[in-house]
């Protein structure tokens, strides 16, 4: 009786595992677009990083040929000052105006993505620079994920 019960449980478990519809988001089957032209303007380092991160998801075998135009604007403003009127926090904002043009059809999509981070000013200047770089990298990752989500939605 135990053998039948164990066999039944194992077969049910295998059936449940095989019927799972999990798919990896980064698989080659999910890359359904090819960025034929990529034009990005703005801060050179930020532009380069965004372009390289988005290009990783482009597939030459993808049926959708697109042209991607991105205009970046980075703003750094004072968020907070202390009693001595020294800056203690900065607000870093990255705005990406994205225009996606489907080269197979005449469809054109315009979106604006905005990401904001606040970083602290430290006593040591190099620590402040590191905080700025971490905030900038975080903003880049947010913008890239939002652009890729839009590409996946429109070309799925």
Image (spheres, helix red, strand yellow):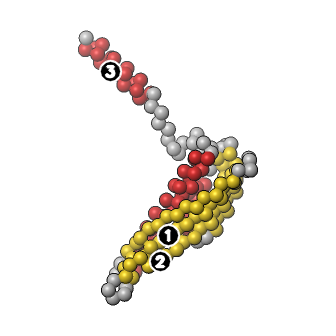
Q: Quadrant of residue 100?
A: bottom right
Q: Quadrant of residue 132?
A: bottom left
Q: Quadrant of the N terminus?
A: top left
Q: In this orientation, does residue 127 appear?
A: no
Q: Say whether residue 148 is left or right of residue 22.
A: right
Mark 1 vs mark 3: which is more N-terminal?
3
Q: Give above or below for 107 relative to 120.
A: above
In the rendered image, residue 42, in percent from the top left (x then y), is placed at 61, 70
Q: Say whether residue 74 is left or right of residue 71.
A: left
Between the C-alphas of marks 1 and 3, the distance is 54 Å
| Closer to us: 13 or 113 | 113
Badge 1: residue crowd in 10 Å (few <14, some 14–19, many ≥20): some
Query: Which residue sits at x=37%, y=20%?
Result: 11
Q: Which mark is residue 9?
A: 3
Q: Which mark is residue 77?
A: 2
In the rendered image, residue 69, in percent from the top left (x then y), is placed at 66, 61
- Circle 3 or circle 2, nearest the eye: 2
| Residues under numbered marks 1 and 2 in contact, where contact means CB atoms less than 8 Å apart | yes
Between the C-alphas of marks 3 and 2, the distance is 61 Å
Q: What residue sits right under mark 1 in the picture?
A: 93
Q: Give above or below for 106 relative to 82.
A: above
Q: In this orientation, does residue 145 appear?
A: yes
Q: Say whether residue 68 is left or right of residue 91.
A: right
| Mark 1 residue element | strand
């Amino acid at each position: 009786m135990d053998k039948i019960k164990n066999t039944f449980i194992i077969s049910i478990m295998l059936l449940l595992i095989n019927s799972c519809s999990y798919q990896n988001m980064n698989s080659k089957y999910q890359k359904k677009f090819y960025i034929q032209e990529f034009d990005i303007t703005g801060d050179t380092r930020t532009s380069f990083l965004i372009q390289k991160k988005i290009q990783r998801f482009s597939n030459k075998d993808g049926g959708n040929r697109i042209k991607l135009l991105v205009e970046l604007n980075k703003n750094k403003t004072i968020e907070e000052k202390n009693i001595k009127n020294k800056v203690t926090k900065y607000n870093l904002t990255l705005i990406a105006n994205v225009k996606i043009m489907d080269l197979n059809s005449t469809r054109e999509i315009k979106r604006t993505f905005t990401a904001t981070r606040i970083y602290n000013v430290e006593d040591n200047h190099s620590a402040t620079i590191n905080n700025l770089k971490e905030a900038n990298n975080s903003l880049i990752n947010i913008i890239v994920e939002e652009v890729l989500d839009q590409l996946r939605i429109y070309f799925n």
